[in-house]
Amino acid sequence: MKQNDVIVIGGGIAGLFAAITAARRGKQVLLMTKGVGALAIAGGTVDVYGYDAGGAPVRNPAAALTELGPEHPYARVGRENVIQAMQAFLELCAGEGYPYKGVLEQNQWIPTALGRLKPTCFVPMTMDASRLKAAGDVYVIGFEGLKDYSPRVMADGLSHYSGYRKNYTTAVLKTELENGRDLTALDVARWLETPSGLKSCIDQIARIANPHALLLLPPVLGTRPDYSIFDQMERATRCQVVETIGLPPAVTGFRLRRMLLGCLRKWNVQMIEQTNIIGATVERGRCAEIVTKNLDRERSYRAQSVILATGGFFGGGLEAEPGGVRETIFDLPVPAPVEQSEWSQRHLFFAGAQPFAKFGVRTDERLRPVDEAGKVMLENVFVAGKTLAGYDYCTEKSGNGVALATAYRAGLEA
């Protein structure tokens, strides 16, 4: 049985970044995943903290971190760790030739496919929304057959915002991909990676757009974590180009995941995919081994430390049962009201956090799981990402920010 230094469980951004963090410090890391994680279809931006508890927009996430309650994961790991984690992420992206734009002291407001503005902190260079605010003429570009993206809806929505009342022109381009089904952004991105597809797109834009205008596109500028298609389009059209946030499947998250997977290979992280973990062996307050069972037989994997980044309810890290909630690998306690009627508010999108959104595993400041009395339950297990209790990533717009901050801390601890 091979002995690893660190086992990371989870294929989302928290698991990937935790594995990279530990591996870069000389540890032998094994990453175990059941699926690809939500990052593969998500927006690829890093929301650190977008809205406070009262629903007010946060302008300076770095300053707002000091106002969070003690149960919030940011408070658990500490403001300095959050700062270090974000810096580590930015340095990683820049080193891989896919730099991100943004600072922790100021949120950016980027356009979505519905014509709304969303607060986020760090974005790919293709999503520099400050260009949109400064632009005069804006061409909102769609693609024939691309579902869930209407240039007219986007233009109408943005024009309601102060500072975004522009001279909008909408256009829908042909892709030659129509085959009787709706297209996704991934289809169009792959088309643009072909010389004929990129040329066709640029030629169509050149016929309708004036030079020096701004082109607002869905997230379709290729699947690779680089800016080659973005640069070629700007040079050929003589326009500025900005990608929006798109509905899943969004290519920007696909690019970020692809970059992180490349880092795993670079740092010799072993990865086992489609793994069915059925439990763990605990000896004297420590995880001794992780147990899996696939079609052939049970297997056991040992490590000095384990990072648990299996996600929340949607990721399978937490499961709801009659009268309670359980964590699925170690059966760690997840505090929740006995009456399930108290788990949620009547209206899903009411102004405030849903109680169930904050369910998760409680930890100490080192991210080790604790019981109701605050006693550490597993000395060598560290929890990261949406498995953690104390925050509503959807309402406060903090999902990838918490994932990176806690993954970084867990990677250092492990």
Image (spheres, rainbow, N blue to C red):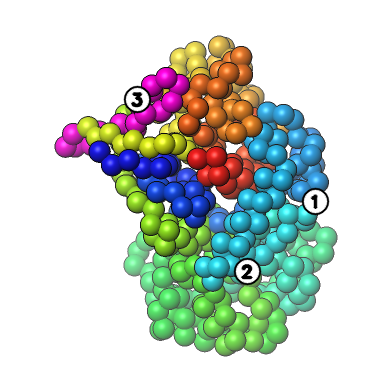
Please rate how many residues cluster around mark 2, counting C-alpha atoms within 10 Å: few if below 14, some from 14 to 19, many from 20. some
Q: Residue at x 65, y 82 (%)?
A: 239
| Three-letter amino acid code of the residue under disc 2 | Met
Dot 1 or dot 3: first in sequence order is 1
| Three-letter amino acid code of the residue under disc 3 | Thr
| Three-letter amino acid code of the residue under disc 1 | Arg
Name the residue at the left extreme: 296
Image-based side of 224 in relation to 153, left or right: left
Dot 1 or dot 2: first in sequence order is 1
Mark 3, residue position = 281
Q: Is residue 267 above or below residue 174?
A: above
Q: Position of residue 412 (x, y in %)?
A: 55, 44
Residue 288: image tag: none
Mark 2, residue position = 125
Confirm whether residue 47 shows in the render: no
Residue 61 or 214: which is nearer the viewer?
61
Secondary structure state at the residue bearing disc 2: helix
Magenta segment boundaries in residue numbering: 280-297
Dot 3 or dot 2: first in sequence order is 2
Q: Main secondary structure of the magenta part?
A: strand
Mark 1, residue position = 59
Q: Position of residue 257 (x, y in %)?
A: 47, 57
- 285 inside magenta stretch: yes
